[in-house]
Amino acid sequence: MALKSKSKVAELSGIPWATRKPRTPKAKIPWLEPKKVTSTDHKTAPAHKLALLEEGQRAETQALRLLEQQGLMLVARNHRCRCGEIDLIMAQGSTAIIVEVRLRNNNRHGSALESVSTHKQARVSRCAKLWWVQKGQRQFKHLRFDVVALEHGTEPKWVQNAWQISN
C-alpha cells in the first residue's frame, strides 16, 4: 500500500482546516509594539536611593557583627522569596533565628523598634515559613524571630524572641 500525501489524507478524512490557505498576518501597529531596549536605555536608581541601600547594608553588617560576637552563626543574608525578604538568618545550636534589622536616623516617626509593625511581622513570618519548609526544617528544630534596632548615635538593641509566629 502506497503512502498518501497529507492533503489527500485530509480530503479523504473530511478535515476542512487541513486544506485551508494560511492566514495573512495582522497589521502591526507601531505604538502597541513593545519597545526594544538598547544598551543605552538602562535606568539606574537615583543617587539618594543608592545611598539608602548602602546605609541599609552597613546597618545589616553592623547587626551581623553584633550577633556573631554573641556566638550566633550566619546561615543566610538577604534571603528573598516571593513574599518578601529576610535580612539575616542566624543559627544558635538547633535554633534558626530570623533577624529583622531596623535602622532609624531620627525619631520623628518613632523609634526603630516601633517601626516593626504587625504588617512587617506578618510579611517576615510568611517568608520565614516558606524558608522553613524549603530548607530550615532539615537543619533546625526551632524557629525564633529577633529584631536588631539601630538608631543614629546609640548602641544597637537586640530584642530576642520579638514576636511569635501565628498560623
Image: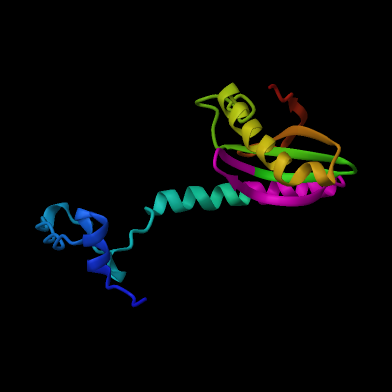
Q: Quadrant of the N terminus?
A: bottom left
- The reply, left or right, for residue 73 in relation to residue 7 is right
On the question of residue 131 being in view, the answer is yes
Residue 68 coordinates in the image, percent (x, y): 81, 49
Give the farthest residue toward the front.
1
Tell me the residue at 62%/49% (across/down).
Answer: 78
| Front residue of 167 and 163 | 167
Residue 145 coordinates in the image, percent (x, y): 74, 32
Asked which quadrant contains residue 96, the reply is: top right
On the question of residue 155 being in view, the answer is no
Residue 116 coordinates in the image, percent (x, y): 61, 27
Tell me the residue at 59%/47% (across/down).
Answer: 80
The segment highlighted magenta reads 59-86
Q: Quadrant of the C terminus?
A: top right
Up-down: is 80 above or below 34?
Answer: above
Would you say residue 138 sits in the magenta stretch?
Answer: no
Asked which quadrant contains residue 146, the reply is: top right
Up-down: is 57 above or below 108?
Answer: below
Tell me the residue at 56%/39% (across/down).
Answer: 84
